[in-house]
Image (cartoon, rainbow, N blue to C red):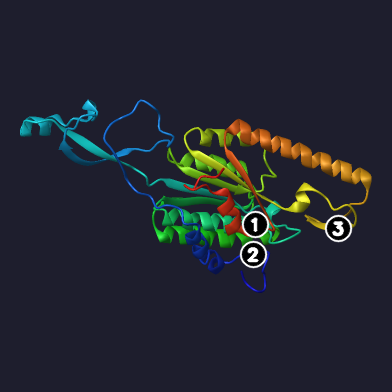
């Protein structure tokens, strides 16, 4: 991060430096797995194909459906085909940089934490041998980048993330006519359009703007892909301090409130509870894997706790 904006904006150079954090996580690289026979049980990996590797002499236990009859006839002895499981997969990162993420009471702004998480995941996917793409949106603008297995693709994605952070800060001044439709639901619809079956999809957002459509859209994605919802949260969004006067940013300037007011505390707690329950139901119905990262967390350490030994959250 730049010294001038240590908590409110992370530039492209800062996102590029996250390569070191991604390498430190040490996830296994993609490797082909040889398969001799087809089993009866469905693989937990969705939508992954099998690529032809070689032909060798038939051995007891080989699947007879894999016999290469042309080679068998030519060599006058049974030969079977070997395949490699295609382990390279598309990774799609949805990075929400909307107005509600330009906020924090501790640590860095939610948009900075979201950008850092997306950046580490992008490098992580590249070093694991996967294709990397993303959808970045900030309320006014939405940019789609299809997955590709190139460092240049990751740099383009990170450049978009860095630029749209600035757009968020200046959104009131730069919004174009008809803008304002680059929402979470819009991004999820775009993800349905560009995601290949079997993709690994990470949705990085604060999920404050979920609608009645959000669960259906997430569920549609999760039906043929592995989807994780990474929620960026500030402590103030979960619980108010017991006393004191505070100001939060609003469209028309700062809004002050007194957290020592019992009625205000109860109303706020009810609002938090309702949203928490709605979000839990949204994720449960959609069948996605949720996890949370706080604004006070270091993103690399938070991801290390969230990512399993094979790169799956939970």
Between the residue at mark 1 and the residue at mark 3, the CA separation in whole angstroms equals 21 Å
Residue 250's spot in the image, x, y percent?
79, 55
Q: Mark 1 or mark 3, which has the lower sequence index?
A: 1
Please tell me whether residue 62 is drawn above or below residue 145 in the rendered image.
above
Residue 289's spot in the image, x, y percent?
58, 40
Disc 2 to disc 1: CB gap under 8 Å:
yes
Between the residue at mark 2 and the residue at mark 1, the CA separation in whole angstroms equals 8 Å
Quadrant in the picture for residue 117: bottom right
Please tell me whether residue 130 is drawn above or below residue 37 in the rendered image.
below
Question: Between residues 30 and 218, which one lies in front from this camera angle?
Answer: 30
> Quarter of the image containing the N terminus?
bottom right
Q: Residue at x 58, y 67 (%)?
A: 11
Please rate how many residues cluster around mark 2, counting C-alpha atoms within 10 Å: few if below 14, some from 14 to 19, many from 20: many
Circle 3 — which element? strand
The label shown at residue 9 is 2
> Quarter of the image containing the C terminus?
top right
Question: Between residues 273 and 314, which one lies in front from this camera angle?
Answer: 314
* Number of numbered discs: 3
Quadrant in the picture for residue 108: bottom right
Circle 1 — which element? helix
Q: Which residue is mark 1?
A: 111
Circle 2 — which element? loop
Quadrant in the picture for residue 77: top left
Image side of residue 49 versus residue 248, left or right: left
Between the residue at mark 3 and the residue at mark 2, the CA separation in whole angstroms equals 23 Å
Q: Mark 3 or mark 2, which has the lower sequence index?
A: 2
Q: Is residue 254 visible?
A: no
Q: Which residue is mark 3?
A: 246
The label shown at residue 3 is none
Q: Mark 2 or mark 1, which has the lower sequence index?
A: 2
């Amino acid at each position: 991060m730049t010294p001038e904006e240590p908590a409110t904006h992370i530039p492209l150079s800062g996102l590029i430096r996250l390569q070191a954090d991604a390498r430190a996580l040490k996830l296994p690289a993609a490797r082909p797995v040889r398969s001799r026979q087809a089993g009866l049980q469905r693989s937990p990996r969705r939508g992954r194909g099998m690529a032809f590797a070689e032909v060798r002499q038939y051995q007891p236990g080989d699947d007879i459906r894999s016999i290469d009859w042309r080679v068998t006839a030519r060599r006058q002895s049974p030969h079977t085909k070997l395949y490699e499981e295609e382990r390279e997969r598309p990774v799609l990162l949805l990075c929400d940089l909307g107005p509600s993420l330009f906020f924090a009471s501790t640590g860095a702004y939610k948009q900075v934490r979201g950008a850092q998480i997306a950046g580490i995941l992008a490098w992580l996917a590249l070093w694991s041998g996967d294709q990397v793409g993303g959808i970045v949106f900030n309320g006014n603008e939405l940019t789609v980048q299809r997955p590709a297995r190139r460092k240049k693709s990751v740099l383009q994605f990170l450049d978009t993330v860095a630029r749209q952070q600035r757009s968020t800060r200046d959104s009131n001044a730069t919004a174009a006519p008809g803008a304002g439709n680059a929402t979470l639901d819009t991004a999820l619809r775009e993800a349905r359009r560009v995601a290949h079956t079997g993709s690994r999809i990470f949705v990085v957002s604060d999920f404050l703007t979920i609608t009645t459509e959000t669960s259906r859209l997430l569920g549609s994605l999760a039906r043929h892909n592995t989807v994780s919802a990474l929620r960026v949260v500030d402590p103030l969004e979960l619980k108010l301090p017991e006393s004191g006067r505070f100001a939060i940013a609003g469209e028309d300037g700062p809004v002050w409130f007194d957290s020592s007011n019992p009625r205000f505390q109860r109303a706020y707690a009810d609002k938090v509870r309702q949203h928490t329950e709605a979000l839990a139901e949204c994720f449960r119905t959609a069948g996605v894997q949720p996890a949370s990262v706080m604004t006070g967390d270091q993103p690399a350490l938070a991801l290390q706790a969230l990512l399993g030994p094979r790169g799956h959250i939970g």
